[in-house]
Amino acid sequence: MTISLYLFGGGQMIEAIIRASLKNKAIKKADTFITDISEQRVKYLKERYGVNAETSINDFLKDSAIVLLGIRPQDDWSGLIKTIAERNPSTQVISIIAGVTIDQLQKAAGKELAITRIIPNTLTDTGFGYSGATLSRKSDKIIIDPFLSSFGKVDYIPEEQIDIYTGYGVAGPNYVYNFFIALTNAGVLGGLSRKQANAVALENLQGAAKMLEITGKHPYELLDINNSAGGVGIAAQHELDASDFAAGVQNAVLAAIQRTTDLGKDD
């Protein structure tokens, strides 16, 4: 079953959602409309994906089953939610605006709407990654879940966990990419070609993640398997333990969580 979808904003995250949702047949081109202030972006999205797109608000808004707010927290989200409340108060509103709460949106709307706040994952093309979603009292999970699930897994969480989810889960690939770069640079430093180092690191990342999944073992248990007495693995482990590697990752996550919280206070 497909739904009619109206999207405010046409940035990279919205494009990724559209691409995955079209691929997984959760939406149809003809039933998807995008409003973005950039004429260049509108032209690109129309040509690339065959969806409807304009720089102004279209009457398509009145009949859309889902309206997605994909704008920045510094944009006029309060004005847009008022417009939605006036033109289509029965629609399912999904907000991906960082730092803006459901309560803030409800107050700006001037009436109670069905608002679901989500933090979308950035791995939409892979089928991996969790989006964190918080439902309001009037949200209809039956309507929104097929759409949200079309661009990854969904974890329905209390809203107080949204900022944590953003800094930890949604920013999660950033930490992995940085680890990958550090690991491949180490391989090159040790004497491998960049091509060799990239291939080995990618294989190890995928394989190690699969081992965690299929064995259900704690990482410490798997480390014990690799770290034999006086061996290569335990020598590497000693250096990692002596470094600020773990603290660096943890501090990065906490900084990302704090930045998400700050965005909501900037309005």
Image (cartoon, rainbow, N blue to C red):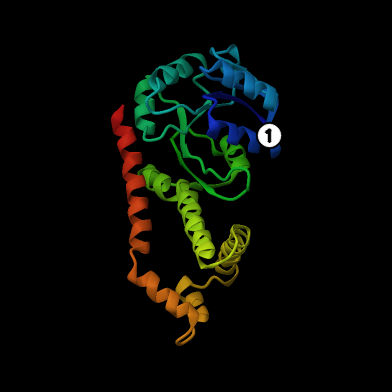
Q: Does residue 30 show up?
A: no
Is residue 236 positioned above or below 145 on the image? below
The percent coordinates of residue 102 (x first, y second) are 39, 32
Q: Nearer the viewer, residue 258 or 243?
A: 243
Look at 52% across and 73% down and name the residue there: 217
Q: In the image, is 147 to the left or to the right of 101?
A: right
Neighbor class of circle 1 (other Cα within 10 Å; few <14, some 14-19, many 20+) is: some
Q: Is residue 171 above or below residue 83?
A: below
Task: Name the secondary structure under disc 1.
Answer: helix
Query: How far across and down, in percent of the image, does residue 216 sit?
Result: 54, 70
Image quadrant in which you'd find residue 202: bottom right
For the point 47% across and 49% down, which residue is it? 174
Disc 1 residue type (three-letter):
Leu
Q: Position of residue 256 (x, y in %)?
A: 36, 46
In the rendered image, the quadrant that contains the C terminus is top left
The structure residue drawn at horizontal position 46% and vertical position 14%, both measured from the top left corner, is: 86
Residue 214: percent from left, percent from top: 60, 69
> Is 49 left, or right, of 211 in this rendering?
right
Residue 71 visible in rendering:
yes
The residue that disc 1 covers is 22
Q: Is residue 92 left or right of residue 74?
A: right
